[in-house]
């Protein structure tokens, strides 16, 4: 539980300090890459970096998972 709490604080401080883009901006980047409704957005750590993992639901019912760099918004993967 302590690790989880520490990770939550680190993520929040990353956004507050401007080291990570706002979730709404990450959502826009993801919707551009995989059009659909955003159903989940998570800010995660990968080593020393932050990434957003955004799940979108397309009109045809398929789900896409977009991973993007937390600071730049550059798309890393789409699955």
Image (spheres, helix red, strand yellow):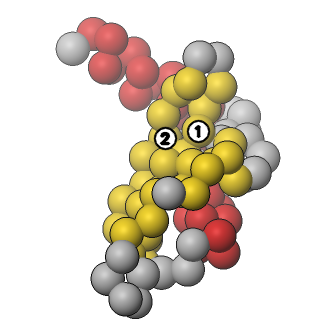
Residue 27, image x and y in percent? 56, 65
| Label pair 2/1, CB-CB below 8 angstroms | yes
Tag 2 residue: 43
Q: Closer to the N terminus: mark 2 or mark 1? A: 2
Asked if residue 8 lies left or right of residue 74, the reply is left
Give whichever of 30, 6 is nearer the camera: 30
Above or below — where is 49 with respect to 55? above
Element on which disc 1 rests:
strand
Q: Residue furthest left?
A: 1
Give whichever of 38, 66 is nearer the camera: 66
Which circle marks residue 51 in the picture? 1
Residue 6, image x and y in percent? 39, 15
Above or below — where is 42 with respect to 31? above
**Residue 44 visible to an observer of this rendering:** yes
Element on which disc 2 rests:
strand
Residue 30, image x and y in percent? 60, 65
């Amino acid at each position: 539980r302590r690790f989880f709490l520490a990770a939550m604080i680190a993520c929040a401080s990353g956004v507050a300090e401007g080291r990570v883009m706002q979730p709404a901006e990450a959502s826009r980047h993801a919707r551009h890459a995989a059009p659909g409704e955003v159903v989940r957005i998570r800010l995660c750590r990968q080593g020393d970096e932050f990434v957003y993992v955004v799940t979108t639901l397309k009109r045809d019912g398929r789900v896409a998972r977009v991973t993007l760099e937390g600071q730049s918004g550059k798309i890393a993967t789409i699955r």
